[in-house]
Amino acid sequence: MNIPMVDLKAEYALLKDELEPAVLAALASAHYIGGPNVRAFEQEVAAYCGVKHAISCASGTDALLLALRACGVKPGDEVITTPFTFVATASTVSMCGARPVFVDIDAKTYNLDPARLEAAITPRTRAVVPVHLYGQPADLAPMAELCRRHGLRLIEDAAQAFGSEYGGRKAGAYGDIGCFSFYPSKNLGAFGDGGMVVTDDDALAERLRMLANHGSRVRYHHDVLGYNSRLDELQAAILRVKLKRIDAFNAARRRIAHTYNARLAGVVETPYEDGKGLHVFHQYTLQSERRDAIQQALTAAAIASAIYYPIPLHRQALYAEQCRQVVLPVSETAAARVLSLPISPLLTDEQIDRVCAVVHQALAA
């Protein structure tokens, strides 16, 4: 019995009777770009997140790029972010001609460490981009205060954290802009690529919409260099169905994660929840000095696992020259020890038992 990281086939089977009519209705409408499902989904996400504006786009990467551009990040600027994340968090900064400045993470949460931020601020700093890694919100309150004092923008990379909460607000709604990905394996996943930016700032929302639409407010009038970044109607129809289940699915992820915790306590370092927000466990990520032995045993048992992320960004070839003098020990240690186990809302107790049994066996060998 294979156990995948996330069982998209089981999720489709569960939602098939809702998904297929929604897709067929969208097909029959012939409104494939900017149709009623896109507009409705934007309104539903804005209401869910408790913000005034939600602007859809083509991917989570585009969401970050649009957010940075809307906040005025330009060549010569610096943007502070984490090295322990997917490359898009930093590469979008580079796409703006700016320089990502990597600050080390908290050893327990894997998120950007607020205590290390101020020392990295220079006159060229324009924004801070924390990542809500694995579904646990970063500690945003001290970051927001720091940004306020220094006149910086706070852009949340919430690609892994749709539905999580911090300080009584949904992830993405705390900073100036929040960025989401709807990649299929995300907590709220499409059947292809998709993204969203959310904000309470009217001026930022107007600029985001313009940038996503070829730099145009009025058709055939182009004010700035923009992009063609759109969420298509079929994906919006699918996401509207799945949005109705997000809270129940996130609650299931939390239950499964806590079951893992109980069965793996004392054997590996289980995920830490800081209590400042709601962790939605996009990934269930443990730490162990014998990470590789565990992964080999899981592979032999036809159980998926993954390392997010094996090479911190400051050690990637893309940033090697820029970061040749940079040492970020917490990120480097985490990269050598972390392992993510299968987790999805539909993971069964039998599957959890099997995963945990293999972990125990690997460490007893």
Image (cartoon, rainbow, N blue to C red):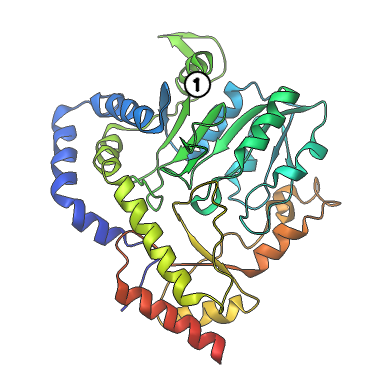
- Location of residue 34 (image quadrant): top left
Residue 134 visible in the snapshot: yes
Element under label 1?
helix
Q: Is residue 153 left or right of residue 32?
A: right
**Label 1 is placed on what type of residue?**
Leu
Q: Is residue 169 left or right of residue 146?
A: left
Q: Is residue 291 left or right of residue 228?
A: right
Look at the picture and state if 337 lies above or below 328: below
Question: For mark 1, what is the residue?
Answer: 208
Q: Position of residue 249 (x, y in %)?
A: 32, 52
Local packing at callout 1 (Cα closer than 10 Å; few below 14, some 14-19, many 20+) is many
Q: Position of residue 341 (x, y in %)?
A: 46, 68
* Residue in the image at 49% along x and 81% along y: 359
Residue 97 visible in the snapshot: no
- Location of residue 31 (image quadrant): top left
* Residue in the image at 27% along x and 44% along y: 242
Q: Position of residue 239 (x, y in %)?
A: 29, 40
Q: Quick one: quadrant of the N terminus?
A: bottom left
* Residue in the image at 70% along x and 54% along y: 316
Residue lying furthest bottom: 365
Q: Quick one: quadrant of the C terminus?
A: bottom right
Residue lying furthest right: 325
Look at the picture and state if 187 lies above or below 227: below
Q: Position of residue 361 (x, y in %)?
A: 49, 88
* Residue in the image at 62% along x and 36% along y: 141
